[in-house]
Amino acid sequence: MFLVSDPGTPSSLIMFDNSAKLISIRSAFGVLALMLTFALIACSDGSSEVDQAESDGRLRVVTTVSPITSLVENIGGTRIRLEGIIPEGLNSHTYEPAPSVARLITEADLIVLNGLFLEEPALNMAEANKKDAAVILQLGDKTVTPEQWQFDFSFPATAGRPNPHLWPDPILGLKYAELVRDELSRLDADNADYYSVNYESLKLRIDELDQGIVASVQTVPEGNRRLLTYHDSWAYFALRYGMTVIGAIQPSGFSEPSARDVAELIDQLRELEVPAIFGSEVFPSPVMEQIAKEGGATFIDQLRDDDLPGEPGDARHSYLGLMLTNMEIMIVALGGNVQALSQFDTGPVFDGESGAIYPQ
């Protein structure tokens, strides 16, 4: 049994049950209204959102790690539908995409990855599930040549796979943005001018960031311009700004270091008198506290490589916010200051709300 309002008599109710034989014309209108309501509810499920997304004409773009999602968002702005697939706070090297990611990929016009062997399971899924016309863009592979690859403790040359963390070098991050601009403009020529304007605005912002980092590093005593981190994400950054990566705690197999490795790092810290070493929330490692304590350094576990600060919608939840926050932590811990970056704007370079999705 169910109840429905009689549209001709708002204060009354008409009752139906299985024994009802006749329905008045006025009550029939009530049934029709109820049926229309059910139809509207049915059209509001997840499949209708897909239909609406396809009908709004915007490119559908899928990205991997959040710094790349942020760079793509700054170029695409409100003219694309953008969704990242690797949740923030996870290890992007070992992330295995859920089956639900395959559907996102089948609907995408552009799939943007870092490349350089960073997100191989996601790349494999993209190659297996993308539609014929979709483009897979691997930014790192188009940004540095094999001759420019950096190898280190976490990414030894013997393994043949370079350090893939190019974006902590903001000039390489800008190259990522340039590649995204070019691909979006090729796929969506009607909005090419919009993408170019956003790129030029981002370029100005990144140029300012670059100059601010140069000035900030200069405030660090020369003997302190050394980095010991858990996961080595700073090879390209160090190369640009005249810093030295003296080691990384995490071996290439993403395991914990051996006792011998730990002892050597402690000896190195004591010899070089490095004031601070850096871990991250994404890669918790109790052994770093031991290394810092025995090596006479402060342990700071707040550096980030692909986990943006704050929550989606926060002012610093962006690639620019990631870089500024890291500089405030790193430079100060090594004895310098970041006054040159005190007025730096980490917000988006475009107007409006993009609706970009950053999985958490």
Image: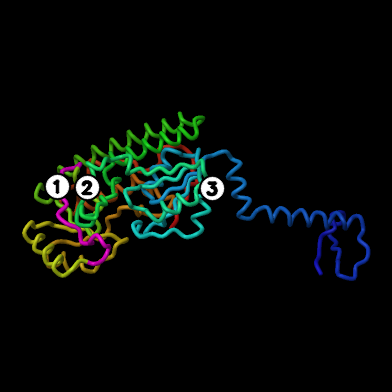
Q: Which residue is mark 2?
A: 150
Disc number for residue 89: none
Separation of marks 1 and 2 at Cα, in angstroms: 24 Å
Report if residue 253 lies within the magenta region. yes
Residue shown at the point (83%, 58%) measured from the top left:
31
Query: Between 123 and 317, which is closer to the camera in this rendering?
Result: 123
Q: Earlier in the sequence, mark 1 or mark 3?
A: 3
Query: Between 352 and 303, which is closer to the camera in this rendering?
Result: 303
The reply to whether the C-beta atoms of the residues labelled 1 and 2 are less than 8 Å apart is no
Please tell me whether mark 1 sits on a helix, a strand or a loop: loop
Query: Between 100 and 192, which is closer to the camera in this rendering?
Result: 100
The correct choice, above or below, for 217 with respect to 256 in the image is: above
Report if residue 111 lies within the magenta region. no
Separation of marks 1 and 3 at Cα, in angstroms: 48 Å
Question: Which amino acid, by three-letter code, is at mark 2?
Answer: Gln
Residue shown at the point (9%, 50%) measured from the top left:
223
Query: Which of the 4 image quarters holds residue 295?
Result: bottom left
Q: Earlier in the sequence, mark 2 or mark 3?
A: 3
On the image, the x and y values in percent for residue 95 come to 38, 59
Question: Which amino acid, by three-letter code, is at mark 3?
Answer: Glu
Please tell me whether mark 2 sits on a helix, a strand or a loop: loop
Q: Which residue is mark 3?
A: 107
Question: Which amino acid, by three-letter code, is at mark 1?
Answer: Val
Region in magenta: 240-256
Q: Is 51 on the left or on the right of 247, as rendered?
A: right
On the image, the x and y values in percent for residue 153 come to 19, 57
Q: Which residue is mark 1?
A: 220
Mark 3 closeness class: few <14, some 14–19, many ≥20 residues within 10 Å: some
